[in-house]
Amino acid sequence: MAEIPDTRVPTVVVDDVHITYTVHGARTGRGSATSALSRLASRGRNPGAREVHAVKGVSFAAYRGEAIGLIGSNGSGKSTLLKAVAGLLPPTRGRVHTQGQPSLLGVNAALMSDLTGERNVVLGGLAMGMTRRQIRERYQDIVDFSGINEKGDFITLPMRTYSSGMGARLRFSIAAAKSHDVLLIDEALSTGDARFQRRSKDRIRELRQEAGTVFLVSHSNKSITETCDRALWLESGTLRMDGPAAEVVAAYESFTGPRKAPPAQDVRPARPPTPRRSPTSARPAPEDEQ
Amino acid sequence: MEPAAPTPLPVHAPGELAALAARHGLTVSGARPSLPAYVGQLWGRRHFITAFAGAKLSAQYSQAKLGQIWQIMTPLLNATVYYFIFGVLMNTRNGVADFVPFLVTGVFIWTFTSSTVTAGTRAISGNTGLVRALHFPRASLPIALALQQLQQLMYSLVVLLLILLAFGQYPQPSWLLIIPALTLQALFSTGLSMAVARLAAQTPDIAQLMPFVLRTWMYASGVMWSLDTHLSSGRVPHAVVVALDCNPAAVYIDLMRFALIDSFTREQLPDHVWAVATGWALVFAIGGFVYFWKAEERYGRG
């Protein structure tokens, strides 16, 4: 790394990280009571448990002001890696060092669905450590940014009445209201409509200027090249390539097979023969499926 | 699965990245803060805790047509049901003067502890979205839920006050004792709820088991009858009766009865009752908090 000048400040250092986790119910299933009983009877070793090695020795350093895209086919370990960076999934081996507390923003992250959008904005802000005054000052910005109120007064309705796209937009808006040292975004951009995507790209640019680092997992190669300057390509849990976003995306595209201007949602390549997790698993699912 | 092109990856010498991180003062992600730092973080989120409790309380009956009227209706109906079963059908009131105030106080005070513990079983598992999306000290959740139950108890106390007046119990200085009694009970219940929250986060089956544990505890704590009158027949060893009398739920319930009901006298309380009540509160509040903190970095992983 001699070519990297000393003026760059690292915000995330991932040092030879391995992540394995145990999947329960992979074979026997926990559907029927009899199988659960037989599982109890054969105590000591669970025949349904299986080890999955999701991330195998990934190392890189991310610097302040960078926007880094994570690409790779389904099940390549992208989301698992992000969870480890966020501190939600401790690595089995190796270490993740971070500047401050990274914030993970995933499409699956639901806030409190029984409460109104308005209350969720306030609670989310308070949970992130903002003061009531800061929230009051930014409240209108958050609501405008999310675009929830563009088609009527939706912000005063409970979040359970929102469409999944609306919910994801509001969650992104809340998280983006505060400047983070490290912001991890898991496919959040692909859920909004075109206008929201444009706004969020602008906001990501601003967040980077506020001396942060942004990680973005997306299956849309277009949003990676437009938003990020650097990209990491993960395949089967190992780092395949690390470099300028355009180069890495080009290499990834030639790997998955050329396509003619695919729509954003349709870039998902065929699933590689990586270990599949059972849908009944209650363990952390490192899948980036929704 | 052949590589598309042999692309050079940056090569890191062993220890190089760790040294880089150390040089710039990066911290290890997902490490648990020290106990004093954790208390500090929690204090920093006090507005979140109160806002969360308030929001949960108002969302609780938001799908019911009668809305917030259920805050009052629920304790009232509970008291009615228990009065019908234990007062009318089973005639447990033998030997208990002022049975209705006795019963209603017992039910309301018990409900506070029991619903706080029940809320604890869902504190983490019911808020995984929040836990995985945002970083905040996780103890905020069981504490906020306990606070919500305390606010709920305030509604119940209004109902209780009306019932006491209706049955000829009038305000007097001893009523002030409910403040220390409720404070100690709240500390105890919150601590227990934090311990249960950790257990249930690791083993979700705890949530299935808890109703049975709580029901057994309720019958053993003299919520609907006087433990002394029912167990002093010699059928049960004296030591067991003393142990049941000193169990935290019974202690807090009896302290409230002592504070509010004229005919419930000092003789019906166990010895050193305030010391016992304080002891339970401190042991559980501190123990439960430390126990919860010890697994802080693991919540929300499942």
Image (cartoon, rainbow, N blue to C red):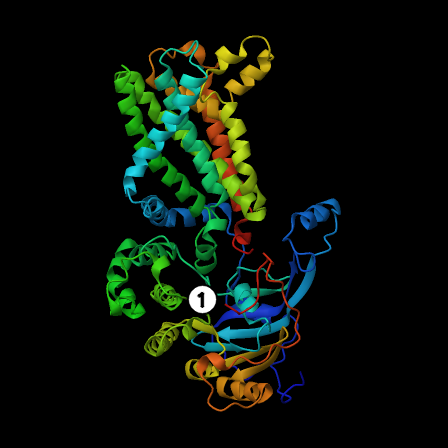
Residue at the far front in the pictured view: B89
Query: Is residue A88 or residue B117 the one in the foreground?
Result: B117
Q: Pinpoint residue B184: horizontal percent, then vertical percent.
A: 41, 29
Please provide percent x and percent y for residue B95. 43, 9
Instruction: Count the marks.
Output: 1
Can you tell which quarter of the image residue B178 is in?
top left
Whether B5 is drawn above or below B13: the answer is below
| Residue ID for mark 1 | A107
In the displayed structure, B189 sits above or below B229; it is below
Q: Position of residue B283 (x, y in %)?
A: 51, 31
Q: Quadrant of the C terminus of chain B?
A: bottom right
Q: Residue at x 55, y 8 (%)?
A: B233
Horizontal side of B176 relative to A91 (left or right) equals left
Q: Nearer the viewer, residue B256 or A5?
A: B256
Nearer-the-camera pick, B262 or B223: B223
Specify the quadrant of the image occupied by residue A284.
bottom right
In what element is the residue under mark 1?
Answer: loop
Q: Amino acid at mark 1?
A: Val
* Residue B259 image point, x, y percent: 35, 18
Residue at 28 percent across and 54 percent down: it is A132
Q: In the rendered view of the protein, which quadrant contains the N terminus of chain B? A: bottom right
Residue B190 in view of the camera? no
Q: Residues within 10 Å of mark 1 (few under 14, many from 20)?
A: many
Task: Determine the residue positioned at 56% across, 88% down.
Answer: A251
Q: Quadrant location of residue B28? A: bottom right
